Image (cartoon, rainbow, N blue to C red):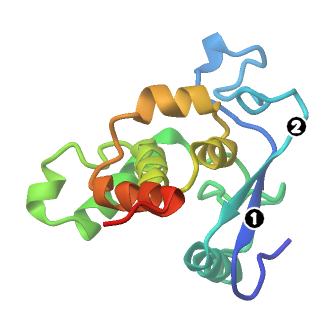
Amino acid sequence: MLPPEKGWGVLTLHDTHPVSGKQWTDSGEHHDKRGLKSREAKENRPVPIPPLLVAMLRAHLKEFGTAKDGRLFTNERGGGLVGSSAYWRVWRDAREYALPPNLQASILGGRPYDLRHTCITTWLNAGVPVAEVARRVGNSSEVIHRVYEGCIYGQEAAMNRKIEAELACPD
């Protein structure tokens, strides 16, 4: 299903295919199909996506379409899962393209998974409630609090204004 022409969209995640290696999977393949973390076996997870990502997704689908099974990305042969080595090559090249040399040398975005942390801290710093962040990323509020409690920065004045407004405090 195509995302909307404009505005917010939703990605629906159905399952995961973690890389383990043939000797460690039940199927004897490099990837075992599994349900989503912290979900019932067949439970999906809707993930709201902002308008900028909707536009990028529409452009990708227009140019490349989807894999036969509906996934957004497929390997160079057009059928299988994208290998982890391919993700790492693309990630390395993207960091070189997007970041100046001093940031390329840093740990910033060292791994694709770091984007998840960046996303969570960005939403928390934007003032999105912890429960909503947890729902969107598929974690519990407790995990978000424990892992990200120190990431909120530069908001003391804004929080003071909110408290003052709620209490109708004079200046």
User: Which mark is on residue 154?
Assistant: none
Q: Position of residue 104 (x, y in %)?
A: 17, 55
- Please state if 72 lies on the left or on the right of 157 as rendered: right
Q: Quadrant of the C terminus?
A: bottom left
- Residue 52, percent across and down? 55, 78
Up-down relation of residue 3 to residue 31 (above or below): below
Residue situated furthest front in the rendering:
170
Instruction: Say if 125 sits above or below 165 in the image.
Output: above
**Residue 109 position in % (x across, y down):** 31, 49
> Do residues under tags 1 and 2 come within 8 Å of each other at their CB atoms?
no
Disc 2, SS:
loop
Mark 1 or mark 2: whose residue is earlier in sequence: 1
Q: Which residue is mark 1?
A: 10
What is the crowding at mark 1: few (fewer than 14 residues within 10 Å), some, or many (at least 20)? some
- Pick the residue in front: 141 or 54: 141
- 63 horizontally vs 102: left or right: right
| Three-letter amino acid code of the residue under disc 1 | Val
Viewer can see residue 55: yes
Q: Which mark is residue 43?
A: 2
